[in-house]
Amino acid sequence: MGKENEVQQFWWKGADGKMKLVDVADFHKAMESVPNRSNGYSPPPPGTKLPGLGDAVAKATTAAGVKPCGGCKKRQEAMNKATPGWLRRVLGKII
């Protein structure tokens, strides 16, 4: 897994009230100069891997006391690949 799991752009509501598509790297550069500014959502820093459904299942089963077997990692990777981007963003806030 690599770049396909990283958030590259997101929608941001500007000071004029209009939504615009912003690059994550540009956002973090701009926000460094503006202390304590937030609209309630900040995207993950560049290079951050968002969790997939496989990661969520693995965390839940481990917490329940299930020991992972040899095929668990393969299933986890397959579920992560099949996880759509919007679900990754939701899981990123939950787990």
Image: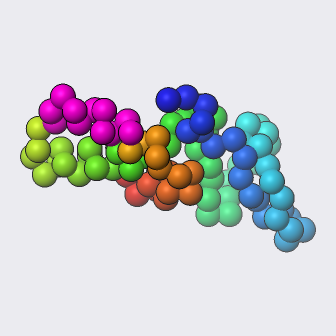
Identify whether 94 is placed above or below 3.
below
Residue 26 picture quarter: top right
82 to the left or right of 3: left
Residue at 18% over, 28% down: 70
Residue 88 rendering spot, x and y as whole percentages: 50, 51
Q: Is residue 57 left or right of residue 65?
A: right
The reply to whether the magenta stretch includes residue 76 is yes
Above or below, 90 relative to 3: below
Q: Is residue 94 magenta?
A: no
Residue at horizontal 23%, vertical 51%?
60
Residue found at the far right of this picture: 16
Residue 81 at x, y = what percent?
46, 40
Pick the front one: 6 or 73: 73
Picture residue at 55% right of the left edge, 39% below the top: 5
Residue 78, position as x, y percentages in the image: 38, 39
Is 73 left, or right, of 84 in this rendering?
left
Along the line of sight, the residue nearer the viewer: 38 or 72: 72
Q: Which residues are magenta?
A: 68-78
